[in-house]
Each structure stands twice: as structure tokens, then as C-alpha cells.
Image (cartoon, helix red, strand yellow):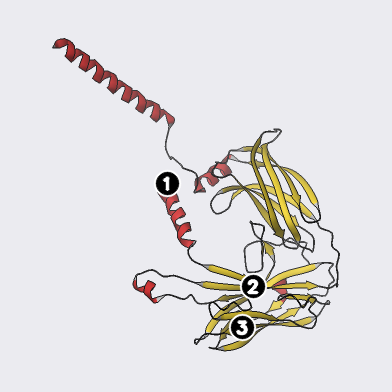
Amino acid sequence: MMLKKMGLILATTVMSFVPLISQTNADGADSVGLRVSAVLPENQRNTGQSYFDLLVQPKDKQTLVVNLVNTTDKPQKVNTAVTAAKTNVNGVVEYAPSKNKLDKSVPFDLAKIATLPSSVEIPANSTKKLEIQLDIPDKQWDGVVAGGISVTQAEASDNGDNKKSGVSVRNRYAYAIGVLLQTRQDPTVKEELNLAKVTASQVDLRNAIISELHNTSETYLKKVAIKSKITRANSRKVLYESDKSDMKIAPNSIFNYPLSLKGHSFKAGRYTMDMTVKSEKNTWHFTKDFTITSKEAKDLNNKDITIIHDEGFNWWWLVALVAIILAIIIYIVRRRRQAQKSE
């Protein structure tokens, strides 16, 4: 098992050297001969921004245009997508495709009202227009519906020298342009946040307690700071605690906030999460009980790559080994004494 876990650590380390560079509003980012920029329409609320910040009406149909500029001597192919803005485990809003989830309170999923080609080929030294058709639902909403247009290089580039040495270095560059849709010019939205559940889980194969926070409001929660601590149920002794700040939660999104066990094993039992969450405007205090079963603890501990597992090890074997060593020492000492007496 230890060899298996060491292999996982090595694989994780190797993957960290495979660059995936995400750039938001990457106008002018010419390091790979590709520039991406939004063509701002007339209903842009803030013309000083380089992303789409649009005032729309129910049942509107709008075409968004993004310029894709290829400054190289070879054609480039890119993959494109529209996704809703979501919040990752680090408290960072993502505008590119991810496995993070939206809360059911969201007015609609931006990805489901957008139509665009899945890929675009840009000829050498030329500009190609990417057009995204938005079909606004027949409904009004109070705040903002947020998402992004992602543009990712479809083909990895390989360095010839690395090919000769049998090593392939893959470089993929991704760009994301934000899209904000509002039906009111200056909306005032009350911030709402709730703690849905607390569970034992993992982040990157490391044990963590996950607090599932739901932003049910149509607005960003900014400058979010979280202080959390875990105790046994009906106990005041703090077992684990966390203090993190400068985070952001996307509108109507689920934030799976992790409290790392930092290499410790899960133990079955009943626990209580005590958490204080502060945003730029509000403060929330949550307490929630949760249970870790013996099976959950065992399964997660076996998968955690930071825990040293001595499978099959029994402390009685150590006691027996020490006893045998002592017996051998005593035997040798006695033999020597007998030998000395007989001389």
C-alpha cells in the first residue's frame, strides 16, 4: 500500500509540471500567438471593463462576439464553451468548465441558454470571430446571472528536443471572458448564505471535513473570511480548526469549504462543526452536527496519501520482537559468564 501511495504522490508531482495557464480577459496575451478579446455591445453596463456586463430583458436574443487573433504562421484550433460561474474549494470563482455545482436557486444556467460552436479553426496570421447566441428566458430576476466564455487550445504543442529524449511536454493555454447578465440597472440584492451539510471527504486525496455552503442570492459574496472548528458532539475541546480569508463566492453557487485534517486519520463518531462566515457586508454563524461512520473513516484513511499505513502491523509483534532480542542478549551474557568461569 505504501508503494501505491508513493506512486500517487509521484504522479501528482509530475502533473504539477504540466502547465495549464488560465487567463481571464486575455486581450494582448500573445505568448502563444493567440489573443482573445470581447467585442462589447451597446447594452454593456460598464464600458470600462473588458468582459461582458450586460443589461438584458426577458425573451431577448443577443449575439456576443469574441475576437480570436492568431499571430502565428500556422493555423490554430481552439475549443470553446460557455459555463455558469461556480466556486471551487479554494474560494475562487471559476468561469471555465468544472465539476463544481450551482445552487437550485439560480434563475437559470447560463450554459443552457447559449449556442456556439464547440471548436473554431483560426487561419494563420488572421482574426476569427466567435459568435455566441444567447436566448434570455422569459423571466425577471433581481440580481446577476454570471458565467464565462472559455477558449482553450485544442492541440498540445510538443518540443522536438523533448520528443527525442522520450519526454513529452504539453502546454495548453486557456482563456476565460466573464459574462454578467442583469435585468436591472443598479440592483440591490440581499446576501443569503446557508450551511446545508457537513461531511467527511477528501481534497486531492487528503482527508478533509467539507462544509457545503450555499449562496442562494443573485450576487457575489466578496472578501469572504471563514473561521471554523470541530469538536466531538457535546464537547468543547477543539480537535481541528481553520481560518481563511480573501475568498469569493459566485452567485447562486455551492462552495464546498474544506477543513484539512493535515495528515490525521478520521475517527468514527459524532462531531459538531462551528463556523463563522463573514463577507464584505454580512456575518453568519452556523453550527451543525455530523457523523463519521467506521466504514467511512476506514475507506477515507486508506485513500489518504499523507497517512503512513503499516498494513498488517500489530503492536504485539513489536513486543514479541523486543522480548526475543532481550532473550538473545541474556543468553549471550550467560554463555560468556559461564565461559569465563570455566577458564
* Residue 38 placement: quadrant: bottom right
Q: Residue at x 64, y 73 (%)?
A: 176
Q: Point out the tag, 1 or 3, that comes first from the N-terminus.
A: 1
Residue 196 visible in the picture? yes
Q: In this view, does 187 lie above or below 27?
A: above
- Kindly report the distance in space between the C-alpha atoms of the residues bearing marks 2 and 1: 40 Å
Q: Write the residue at 58% across / 89% down.
A: 126
In this view of the protein, which residue sits in the foreground, 225 or 275?
225
Q: Is mark 3 on a helix, strand or loop?
A: strand
Badge 1 element: helix
Reading the image, the residue beneath label 2 is 176
- Please rate how many residues cluster around mark 2, counting C-alpha atoms within 10 Å: few if below 14, some from 14 to 19, many from 20: many
Q: Which quadrant holds residue 108?
A: bottom right
Of the residues shown, which amino acid type is indicated by label 2? Ala
For badge 1, the amino acid type reads Met
Up the image or down, 256 lies above or below 32; here it is above
Q: Residues within 10 Å of mark 1 (few under 14, many from 20)?
A: few
Q: Can you say which quadrant of the picture contains the C terminus? A: top left
Question: Gap in Å between the C-alphas at discs 1 and 3?
Answer: 48 Å
In-image side of 332 versus 179 (left or right) = left
Marks 1,3: beta carbons within 8 A: no
Q: Where is residue 146 in the image (x, y as percent from the top left)?
A: 74, 69
Q: Give the CA distance from mark 3 to mark 2.
A: 12 Å
Place residue 189 in its image quadrant.
Answer: bottom right
Query: Which of the marked residues, 3 or 2, is nearer the chain's N terminus?
Result: 3
Which label's residue is closer to the chain start, 2 or 1?
Answer: 1
For image coordinates 31% across by 25% down, the residue present is 325
Residue identifier under label 1? 2
Task: Determine which residue is flagged by label 3.
Answer: 68
Percent position of residue 130, x then y: 65, 83
